[in-house]
Image (cartoon, grey):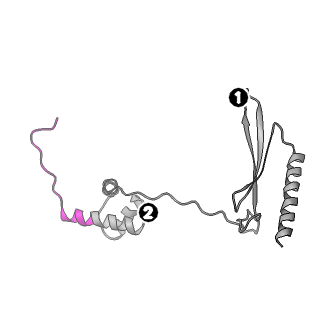
Amino acid sequence: MRSSQWHEPLKRKADDVAWMRIIALAKEYGRYGYRMICAMMRMEGWTANHKYVYRVWREEGLKVPSRQPKCARLFLSDGSVIGLRAEHKNHVWSYDFVTDQTSDGRKFRTRNIIDEYTHEALACRVARRIRASDVLDLLSALDTNFILAAYQDW
């Protein structure tokens, strides 16, 4: 329950100017959070503490946007190769094993090979057990088809 006597807080003109400057800095430097904006305000000569800047930040609904993931680099500084970006069809293939189980608890695996450029599934082999020889057979069959298709296009 509120007491019977209370006063309205006084709003100073300096607060309005500081408020607008915080918003302007947040728009100008979109990747900075409220702490960095507070430090910039202090460097400009304002006497705003972090609690005031945080209050403005919350009331204005300001947010730092989430960072976009960087593209994977192709080469490290020592010259080693990380991977390739696909530039055309059949340039880069990816493969993966996926394990799951049936309702009776028996496991099975799938071997998926995907073309990175077209996102087309080149092969999907499902078996209870996939040996190294099965993987080599599948890759050699795909590689033969790839060579024949390239020869026909040429």
Residue type, mark 1 in image: Ser
Q: Are marks 2 and 1 in contact (CB under 8 Å)?
A: no
What residue range appears in magenta? 1-18
The percent position of residue 86, horizontal first and vertical second, equals 71, 65
In the rendered image, residue 153 lying in the magenta stretch gets the answer: no
Height in image: 34 above or below 153? Answer: above
Q: Which of the two residues, 82 or 124, is positioned nearer the viewer here?
A: 124
Element under label 1? loop
- Looking at marks 2 and 1 on the same chain, the residue that comes earlier in the sequence is marked by 2
The percent position of residue 83, horizontal first and vertical second, equals 73, 63
Residue type, mark 2 in image: Tyr
Seen at 37% across and 58% down, the residue is 62
Height in image: 14 above or below 122? Answer: below
The percent position of residue 140, horizontal first and vertical second, equals 88, 55
**Which circle, 2 or 1, is nearer the viewer?**
1
Q: Which numbered disc covers residue 142? A: none
Q: Which numbered disc covers residue 32? A: 2
Q: Is residue 23 left or right of residue 3?
A: right
For the image shown, how many numbered marks are present on the structure?
A: 2
Q: Considering the image in quadrants, where does the N terminus appear?
A: top left
In the rendered image, residue 10 lying in the magenta stretch gets the answer: yes
Seen at 38% across and 64% down, the residue is 26
Q: Considering the image in quadrants, where does the C terminus appear?
A: bottom right
The percent position of residue 111, horizontal first and vertical second, equals 78, 46
Q: Quadrant of the rendered structure where residue 88 is?
A: bottom right
Q: Quadrant of the rendered structure where residue 128 is?
A: top right
Q: Residues within 10 Å of mark 1 (few under 14, many from 20)?
A: few
Q: Which numbered disc covers residue 103? A: 1
